[in-house]
Structures are given as C-alpha cells and as structure tokens.
Amino acid sequence: MPTEGTLKRWILVNYAGYPFAPNSLMPDNGLANLAGIILDSGGEVEIRDYGTVSTVARMTSPELERRLTRAWNTLKTTNQGPLLAIQKLVTLAKLPGAERERQRLQDRLVNEIGTELIDNIRRKNIQAIGFKLWNGDGLSCSAALAGRIRKACPDIKIFGGGPHVDLFLDRLLRFYPFFDALIYGEGEDTLRQLVASGGATKSYASIPNLIYREGDVLRTTEERMVADLDQLPMPVYDPAVYPAMAGDEKIKLIVIDESRGCRNDCAFCIHPVKSHNNVRMKSISRLIQEVRHIGKEWGIHTFRFAGSCTPYSLLNAFAEEVVKQSLHLQYSSFAHIHHSEEANFKLIRQSGCVALFFGIESGCQKILDRLQKRITTNEITTAIQRANEAGLFTVGSLIFPAPGDTPETAAETIELIRGLHLGSITLQPPVVVPRTRWFENPAAYGFGISDMEKYLNTGMTWKVKIQLPPRFWDVLPMTLDGRSYRKMLARTSAFSKQLAPLKIPTSISDENYLMSKLAGLDPVSFRDRSLAAFYAGDTTVLRELVQSINRAGSGSSW
Ligand code: B12
C-alpha cells in the first residue's frame, strides 16, 4: 500500500517481445540509469529484464525448434533447382503456423510473468512499477501486464516510459488507461520527483515530462531535459538490483549514455524533436570514471555509445584519454558523415573502438537533399575511406525507396556504395515516424496518408519484423510516390537483390561486429549462427555464444 509522501519501492520491467537478435540480449542502459536515480533518492528497486536467453527458451518448444530449424535451413540454402524452389514455397506457406505457435507460447509466458510480478509486488510490498514501452509485442504485452497488475493490485502506481511513448504520447494513454501516467522524453528528473512526491495524482501537474489523466482530460506537463549529464548517478548493473545480469543470461556489452541531442535535422528522424539540437555531453573525466566503475564493479570492458550523434570532439577526446591511461576497452559507436574531417579515426581505433555505424541513406545527391541530410556524396566517400584506412569496421545504413527514388537514383546509390568498401550495409524501407518532418508534412515528401487516425493506430501496434525480409512485414496504411506500402516493400527487397553482387555483408551492426570479435568468429559466421539460433530458439548455441562473448569481454584487469 503506498505511503503518502514517498514512493520508495519500485520494480522496473523490460519486456520487448521475443529476443530475435543479439542486441535483444544487451542490458538496458535506460533502466540502469533510472535504477541509479531511485537508489540515489533513497528508494529500492529491482529491474526485471526479460531480454534473456531464458526468455528464448520459455518461448520455444522442442517441436517448434525442429520446425523452425528446418525452415531456416531450407530458406537460407543457396542451392538452385525447381525442387528446392517448391520446398521453399511450401516452407514459406507454413511460416504463419509457426508464428502462431510462438504467439501461443508468448501468451503463456506473459501470463507467467504477470503471476511472477504480482507475487513479487505483494511479497515485497512494491509501491510502483514502471514499464519500458517498445513497439510491437513490447507494447502489447507490457500493456497486458499493466492491465492485469491494475486489477490484482489496485493500489500500486503503474507508469510507462521509453521510446514508444516518445512517438505516440497521449494516444498510448487513451488506449491503455490502466497506466497512472506515462513519462515521455528523459525519465530521470521525473522519476526523482515521483519518488519524492509519493506519486499522488495531485502532484502530477508540477512534475515534468508526464502524460496523465485529469477527469476526462489528458494532460501533458512541460518537457525538461537533464541539464548536466555528469550529475546523473552511475547506472546500476548489480545483479542484486538487476538479476538478469547474473550468469550468462545477457550479453555483457554495456551501452554508455555519453551524449544526448542531435545537431542534424534529417526529415525522417525523430531525434531533432525528441533529443533536441543542443547536444549535451558527459565530460571526459565522468566517462572515464564510468567505464572504470563498470570495469571494477562488474568486470565488463566492452561498450557501445548510445548517442544518436556523438560529436567527433567527444570521440577524439575520449580516445585520447583512454590511450593516455592505457585502458583496455573495446567499443563501437554511431558516427556521422557530417564534419568527419574533425575525426581522428586512427586515435579512435587505437583506443579500442572497433566499428562505426554511419547513416548514409542514399548515394544520390538529389535524394540526400530531399532527406535533408545536409551531406554530400563526396563527404560520404571521404568519411568512409578515412574510417576504413584507420582499420575501423564501417557500417553504412541505407533507406530505400526514399521519396523520389527511381531506377536511376538506385543505380547512383549502387555506384557510390561500390566504391566505399563498407564492412556491412543495413537496408530499411521508409517509415513515416510520428513527430518527424515526414510526418508533419507527408505530401511534401510524396507520402500519401489518407486517414491519419488509422495510420497512427496501426503504427502504434505495428510489429516490426526486422528478422524477416520486408515482403513479410505487415502493411502500413500509407503510399509513397503513388505506390502502396506492399509495393514499396517489394522495391526494398528488389533493391537488396541489386546490392547483392557487390558482395558486401548485410545486417552486421557495429555492436554485432564487436560481439563477433569477442566470440572469435568472423562477422558473417557470427551473424548467420546467431540469427539462425534466435530464429529457431536454439538455446544451446545461444548460451555458447553468450558465454564466449562474456568471457572475452570481461576480466578484472583494473
Ligand atoms: C542504444 C540502443 C539500444 C540498446 C540499449 C537499449 C536502450 N537504452 O534503449 C540495445 C542494443 C539494447 C537496443 C536494443 C533494442 N532496440 Co534500441 N536503440 C538504442 C538507441 C540507439 C539509443 C537508446 C538510448 O540508449 N538512449 C538513451 C537512454 C538513456 O534512453 P532510454 O533507454 O530510452 O531511456 C530513457 C527514457 O526513454 C525514459 N524511460 C525509458 N524507459 C522508461 C521506463 C519508465 C518507467 C520511465 C519512468 C522512464 C523510462 O527514461 C530513460 C532515461 O532518460 C535508440 C535510437 C536512438 N538513437 O535513440 C534505439 C531504439 C531505442 N531501439 C529500438 C529498438 C526497436 C530496439 C529493439 C527492440 C530491436 C532492435 N534489435 O533494434 C531492441 C530491444 C532491446 C530489448 N531489451 O530487448 C528503437 C525503438 C523504437 C520503438 N518505438 O520501440 C529505437 C528508437 C531505434 C529505432 N529508430 O528503431 N537498443
């Protein structure tokens, strides 16, 4: 029962659906930050993170694993022949059945998780529970859990925060009314105030970043961002607080929240709105203190930076200090084409950075300009060339079809990519994300969204099937350049076939590259081995991979 005055005992929950890729097993830095805030405010907290190997096991039966292993092997074989073509079609036709079976296992798991959570809440007299909200099952299952807890524990305060709230804001509260409030943007200041205020509804109006209900009206309080990232408590990965960190349930590659904000203004991206233009950075001394702390406390020396646009000045200065202090780190980061002349890629590589992820999007200047990327194709070539020369694994991300793309612009992109010698390419179809420029003025970019309510409601519960080729994705009610979404997905698939002769490995993100090095596998073998194991739910292979990454990335050298 909540005591008036403070809201001290918390559970934070991360359920993002079936873990389908290696990064689904990485620890959640956002919740680790929030745990730090709750502890710092004198509260108690436990993080229940279901992005684990055990979740894969709980959502797989031996029969499903056999079926999916067979399906994967058939679909991935490169042998040709009419018999195989028929086998592939039969396998594809059976996939929805396997998907339904996994759905059934997920329903059972979510039911079990609900019972576990309710039991915990009652036993430990928990006063507040906070869900991180993701897209797809990460939303629907978390909301189902919240609804069940609302009924079983009427006095508990239930909150939701995370990336999906930033997209859909009060619409989410309208659909899922059993949350007491949602938190948009950065959660730290809000949580500190919720702990101190006791979560009384009457205090909500004065707490920043809250979306809540007052009678029939949904209210949104003003946004506040953390002014000084150095003042944040250390993130908490202690198994006593974050039990999934014990053993080899998670891949121990920590995301370091080194900077927030983005100076770019790309038309398709939410960051100019969500993270704002004023880039805030942790100081180098705080960053070094943080990596030392994580190394000393939990023996982890492998990282990825979180920031969507980490400034090169920060990467350079961090690298210089890591080299000066002879720290043995391995890490990766987003990088950007803009101002890459400022980057000291050699020093960055020398400090233990192994891979950088660049948003390239297109190789055609006209398309880049329409995307408002504010970069030139020459700048793309220079940035990737310099990063490659320094020995960094470069990942280039493309959007196809972008507004205005034609066979000619596609050919220009392929020509540019041919000369770049990227380590890997990732390819996405466009999605009109709420609050972006594309969303604010779709027609100006060639998008047709005739029923905005329908589009938002479909988008809110849309399940991104990133592990499957685009033609298997659910359709969004929108068009691009007069073509349906289905046709657009077909163009993405066709473009991926056009890229294939370049023989550049696809879908190896910077963190996957880092994991492959730790696992002692070449990146393509790591990608194929891990994706096949996630797809089928082969926990024997997954445990081996996780263990080998964790052994290589940990130690007690300082
Ligand atoms: C680093 C990163 C990761 C890391 C760390 C996770 C994380 N912290 O979000 C890893 C590799 C684990 C990861 C995995 C995934 N990611 Co990711 N990831 C990012 C990235 C690049 C930065 C996120 C980040 O660290 N931000 C800084 C931290 C501090 O913010 P935060 O975690 O969101 O938490 C803050 C607030 O959201 C809020 N908050 C969050 N949760 C809660 C809960 C409560 C109760 C409260 C009060 C507040 C609150 O307070 C926190 C502190 O300020 C973003 C893209 C981007 N540039 O933003 C994508 C992004 C968040 N990821 C995304 C996705 C889809 C995924 C995956 C589901 C799939 C995938 N393979 O990509 C997995 C799922 C992980 C899982 N648990 O199973 C999407 C989310 C889209 C959506 N609407 O759901 C994004 C936006 C990328 C994109 N454009 O598609 N990701």
Image: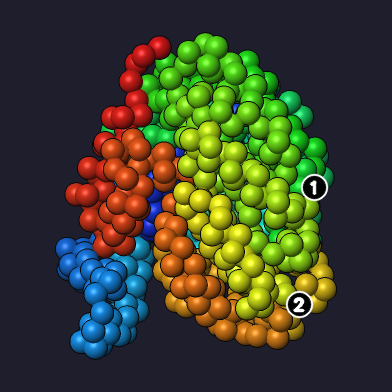
User: Which residue is at 31% across, 56% downward?
Assistant: 528
Quadrant of image for the C terminus: top left
Secondary structure found at label 1: loop
Above/below status of 475 relative to 309: below
Residue of label 1: 221
Residue labelled 1 has its Cβ within 8 Å of some atom of ligand 1: no
Three-letter code for the amino acid on which mark 2 is drawn: Gly
Decide which of 392, 412 is in the foreground and name it. Answer: 412
Q: Earlier in the sequence, mark 1 or mark 2?
A: 1
Decide which of 461, 265 is in the foreground and name it. Answer: 265
Residue 145 seen in the current view: no
Residue 217: give x, y in percent of width and height: 79, 61
Residue of label 2: 446
Residue 103: give x, y in percent of width and height: 36, 69
Quarter of image, res 356? top right
Residue 45: give x, y in percent of width and height: 49, 32
Three-letter code for the amino acid on which mark 1 is drawn: Thr
Within 10 Å of disc 2 (Cα), the crowding (few <14, some 14-19, many 20+) is some
The reply, left or right, for residue 440 in relation to residue 116 is: right
Q: Which mark is residue 423?
A: none
Residue 433: give x, y in percent of width and height: 68, 64
Within 10 Å of disc 1 (Cα), the crowding (few <14, some 14-19, many 20+) is some
Above/below status of 361 relative to 27: below
User: Which residue is at 26% across, 62% downward?
Assistant: 536
